[in-house]
Image: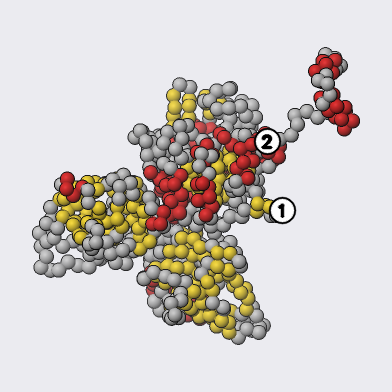
Amino acid sequence: MENTSVDVTFSVMVSTEPNQCVCVTGSDEVLGAWDPTRMLRMTREFTGNGSRPRWTATTKLPNHRTYQYRFVVCKESHMRPAKSRSSVSSSMDTEDQHLHNGSNGSSASTNGSHKNGDSSSSKALPPVTIYKWETNVKPRAFTLDDSTTSLILPDATFGTYDGMTNINKGYLINQCEIQVRLHSNPIYMLKEKHRNQTYSIKCTAVDYSEEGEPLPVEDDDDSRDGPPLCQLNDVYACNLNDHELSVPQPQGPAGLIYNSGDYIVFRSQMPDPDTMGFQLDFYVCEKNRAPRFVGSSHILPHKQKESQVKRKMPIIGCKYRPIGELTVECLIARPVEGLTLTLESSFQTHWKKKDLEKGLERSLDIGHRGMGASYSRVSTLKENTVASFAAAATHGADFVEFDVLLSKDRTPVVYHDFAVKVLYSNIPVQSLTLAQLQSMRLFSGEHGVEINQEQEGMCVRHDPFPTLREVLTEVNDSLGFNIEIKYPQQLIDNTWEVESTVDVNENLDHILRAVYAHAGPRKIVFSSFDPDTCLLLKLKQNKYPVMFLHQGQTAIYTQYKDPRASTFGWGINFALSEHLLGLALHTEVLLRDLSLLERCFSHKMVVFVWGDDNNDPNIILKMRNLKVDGVIYDRIDCHKPEHQGPEFQLSSAKAAASFMQVVQGDGMASHHIIDAPQPVA
C-alpha cells in the first residue's frame, strides 16, 4: 500500500495578547511529538466583526494513521515556523533544526520530550514560554484513510471539545520565573507629607547582559543612563487582596495601585536570571489627575543561590536623590533538571466528582496518614507506614494523605513532623540520614523514638520512615495518594517551624523526580501549607494537580505570618492566581462560615476538608451533604459512615423480635438481662 501524504489544515479561534502566538503539537514528528520546543507554529488570520482571531496551519501528514493533537498559546518571539516532514531532515537553519529534531539535530526520543534544565539541550534551544494550553485528559484526534486527499479540520474553540473545557496555565520548560512581591506596607517615604499619598507601581524587566543594547559611546561613568529595558520579557501583575485583580494580567501604563493591606505580585519568565533585573517606577495617583511619575527603584540580577530573598532598596526621585525605601520579596522558580515533561497529557485541571459505578456524586474518603495518627492517639497501626496505607485501602479509602520531607542525604521520606523526638530532644528530620531515621523505632505508648539497630520483631511494611519510593512501589496503585509536601514557614510571632537547610527548589526537585520515576498510573494530588511550595509545584511539573492546604484563623494552631496563609479569603485568591486545583480547608474554621464553600464552588475549585472535627461520623456526613470533594480523617475503619452499625447482634430474627418486645414493654429489660444465663468460666 502506497504511503501517501495528505495536506491537513488546523484552525482554532482564540484571543491572544501582543507578542503571543498559537501553536499545535501532537503525536507525530511533524507536530513535534508533544515536545514543547518543536511545536508547529500557526498563522493569525483577521476575521473582522470583532470576533476572536482565527489561527491556522497547514502541513503534510502520512495517510492511514490516527493523530492526536492540542493547541498551545506561547510567546511569539520564541517560536519558529515548523516545516513539513519532507524538510525536517534537511533543515537549513540551525535553530529550526533544534526546534524539530532536538539538540544537535539528533532524532527526538520515543515520546518526543524535552528534559528540563538539561545542559545539553536547553542552552542550544531558544527559550520557550507557554502561557496556556488545552488540558482535557484525552487530546483532540482525527484519522486519515484512503478516501482522504486533503483535510480541513473544523474551526476549533480553544480548550473546548468533547463536551468539556479545560485550559491550564503554562509550566517551566527551559526558563526560570521570577516573582517580585510587595506586601505588608512595603513603601516608606522619607517625607511625612508623601506617606499618605497613593502610589501605583509599574514593573519592567531590565537586561543587564553584555549582549544587551550597547550604551552610547559618549556615555561615561557619570552617566545616569542605565541598561536597556527588556521589552521581550512580559511582566504580568496581580493583587491578591483584590478578587477582581487576583489573576495575573498585563500591566497598564502606570502599573497597579498599591493600597494598605494589598499583596501585589509581578512575575516574568526569563532564560537567565543572572543577567535580568527589574525597574520599579512609582506614580502618584490623585483624583481626576493622570498618574505622575515620582521615582524608581532597581532590583539587580538574581545572583544568590537562595530561591527566596527579601530586599530593601532606595526609591530614587526625579532629582536623583533618595525619596523613600522599598521592601520586596523575590522568589525564583527553576525547572527540574533532567525531568521529562511533555504536552501529551495532564490531570492538573481534571477532577471527576461522580462515582462512576453508582452514577452519584460523592466525597472521597481520604485516610489521614493511612489509618490515622498513631503517635498522639490510639491506633491499630503505626501512621505513615506501608501497612497503614494498605489497611486504609482495604477499609474503603479512595486516597491516603501523608507528608513528605527530605532527610539529610536528600532522600524523600514519609513522616508527619519536621522533627523527631529522640529521648529528651527534638532532632530535625533534615539533620538525620535515611539510615539513621530507619534505625529508630517507637517507644511503646510514647510519642517518640529510640535508637534500635536490631529492630527486633519489626516487619519492613510496618517500619516508620518509609521512603517515598517505597510507598509508591509497594502500595497497590489503585489507591490514590494526596502527597503533602512539608516546607517550614515563619509564624506570626516571627519564629520558624524549623530552620530549613534545604532550598525550596531543591526540596521539590528530589520529590518530583521520585514521583515521576515511580508513580506509574496512580492518581496523585500534591498539597502544602506553604504557598511558595504550591506555586512552585504548579510551575515545575505539568501532570499532577496541586491544592493549597489552609488552616485559617484558629486557636488550635499558631497563625502563619504569610498573608496568603492567614485567612481562607486570601487562600482562595492565591489559589485562583496560581490556577491551583483547589484548597484543603480546616473543618473547624469552615463550619463557622460555610459561605466560603460556595465561593470556592463558584470558581469550580475542588475542596477537601481536614482536621480533628472530621473524626466524627456525623461531621463526615455533614461534609458529604455539603458536597465537598474529599474528607480527610483518621480511623477510616471506624469513622467512615458506612461502617457505623450495631456493636452487637442477636442470634436470630426471632430473638431480636423478642428482645425488642421486652425493651418496649414495661421496663423489665434490666431484669431479663440480669437473669440471662452467664457463660461458664
Q: Nearer the viewer, residue 168 or 423?
A: 168
Q: Residue at x 45, y 59 (%)?
A: 171
Q: Which of 600 and 583 is in front in this view?
A: 600
In this rendering, does residue 57 appear at all? yes
The amino acid type of the residue labelled 1 equals Glu
Screen quadrant of the C terminus: top right
Q: What element carries label 2?
A: helix
Q: Which residue is drawn at 46% across and 74% down?
A: 52
The amino acid type of the residue labelled 2 equals Asp
Going from the N terminus, do you reach mark 2 or mark 1 first? 1
Q: Quadrant of residue 151?
A: bottom right
**Compared to 652, does 471 lie above or below?**
below
* Residue identified by numbered label 1: 357
As drawn, the residue found furthest toward the front would be 666
The numbered dot on residue 486 is none
**Compared to 328, does 636 lie above or below?**
above
Coordinates of residue 219 in the picture (x, y in percent)? 11, 65
- State the CA–CA distance, disc 2 to disc 1: 22 Å
Q: Is mark 1 on a helix, strand or loop?
A: loop
Coordinates of residue 680 in the picture (x, y in percent)? 85, 14
* Residue identified by numbered label 2: 637
Whether residue 168 sits left or right of residue 236 in the image: it is right
Q: Do the residues labelled 2 and 1 touch (CB within 8 Å)?
A: no
Q: Quadrant of residue 2?
A: bottom right
Whether residue 101 sits left or right of residue 461 in the image: it is left
As drawn, the residue found furthest toward the right would be 654
Q: Which residue is drawn at 24% across and 61% down?
A: 288
Q: How many marks?
A: 2
**Compared to 309, does 143 lie above or below?**
below
As drawn, the residue found furthest toward the top would be 681
